[in-house]
Amino acid sequence: MKHITEALINRQTLTREEAASLLQHMTNAAFTEAELAAILTVFRMRAITAQELLGFHDAMMEQCVPIRFPGFQTMDIVGSGGDGKNTFNISTLACFVVAACGIPVTKHGNYGVSSISGSSNVLERSGLRFTAIPEVLEAQLTATNICFLHAPLFHPALKAVAQVRQSLKLRTLFNLLGPLVNPSRPAYQLIGTCNLQLARLYREVLNEGDRMYTLVHNTDGYDEITLTAPCKIWTPQQELFLEPGMLQLPTIQPDALYGGDTPEAAATLFRTILRGKGTPAQQTVVCINAACAIHMVTGEGLSAAYQRASAALSSGAAYEVYQQLLQFQQQTHATAYEHHSI
């Protein structure tokens, strides 16, 4: 391991195998907190290569608590974070809309580290408790078309680096890994990235697997489709641009996407939008992201997919999915749910 750390200090890159070994040692408490901070800082000072990210991904998935949902071809919608825009929880809201449209969703998420409110923050403050019990999660998915996979319950190895990550209060390589290590291995993923470099990196990693994916990057720096500017889109087959006016949708002003100053404010806004009571701009942005996911699964035109998503949100169907998930939780024994922070 010494030769790997020395290579990092000398600004050398790692092979896939070396990166996997490094992450295994990091999450197995083989380093002091000072050493961990130094390693994480190295990857803040230079870009991670595709081979390094693949190695980190290999090690994370090898150590995770796997979960499978036989008979389901599920979707996950997630942003890479790191855009510094403080938007409301667009991806999480889009997941409920997609579930209301009949597409099963296994949403993977965590607490925010460098942001006001991650998906776990907003759902926990909205009443959801987390569980890793496969039977409970499969029952949730069957009953409501969605379940939430709280990352710390499925990636226990992260406990070894939790303190350092919290003290740094910066995005680290573990944040970059988040969108790639859903333990349910969903068949479909819509992933937003905060910059073009990361989009290309993710594409190299995703092309190694067999999942269907769509990568999006709004050209003004958002890690979701926001209609504030053109959006670059990648699939395994093609690259294209989505302009705000292409679907007769308005250009959105950035201040319309503000997510609040506290996790409590973010959770309140989340529930308001999910009830179909958000502003037209908020609802439009949620629905275009949901539409992109629906289009990927069904193959229907993006315009028709947008209309389906809009109907699911404005009619209250998406909010009903959320309510059903909470009701299911109330009917399940409390010991099935846990609270873990990381």
Image (cartoon, rainbow, N blue to C red):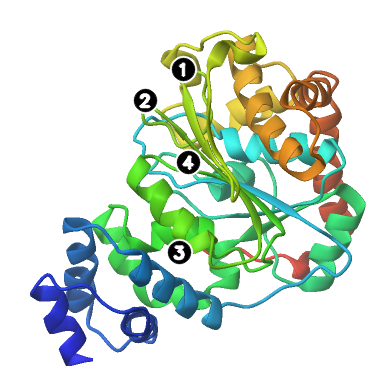
- Residue at image mark 2: 220
Q: CA distance from mark 4 to mark 1?
A: 22 Å
Residue 117 is tagged as: 4
Between circles 4 and 2, the one closer to the viewer is: 2
Pointer 1 residue:
228
| Amino acid on which disc 2 is placed | Asp
Q: CA distance from mark 3 to mark 1?
A: 33 Å
Residues packed near mark 3 inside 10 Å, few (<14), some (14 to 19) or many (20 plus): some
Q: Say which label, 2 or 3, has the lower sequence index.
A: 2
Looking at the image, residue 78 sits to the left or right of residue 162; the answer is right
Residue nearest the viewer, comparing 62 with 317: 62
- Outermost residue toward the front? 237
Mark positioned earlier in the residue sequence (4 or 1): 4
Q: Are marks 2 and 3 in contact (CB under 8 Å)?
A: no
Q: Where is residue 81 drawn, in percent x and y?
A: 42, 44
Q: Nearer the viewer, residue 298 or 165?
A: 298
- In the rendered image, which quarter is residue 65 located in? bottom right
Q: CA distance from mark 1 to mark 2?
A: 8 Å
Residue 63 in percent (x, y) is at 53, 82
Q: Secondary structure at mark 4?
A: loop
Name which residue type carries label 1. Thr
Residue at 74% in and 36% down: 295
Compared to residue 220, the image places residue 94 above or below, namely below
- Identified by mark 3, the residue type is Ile
Q: Is residue 327 above or below residue 34?
A: above
Q: For the N terminus, which image quadrant?
A: bottom left
Distance between mark 4 and mark 2 Cα atoms: 21 Å
Quickly name the residue at label 3.
342
* Secondary element at image label 2: loop
Q: Mark 4 belongs to which amino acid?
A: Ser
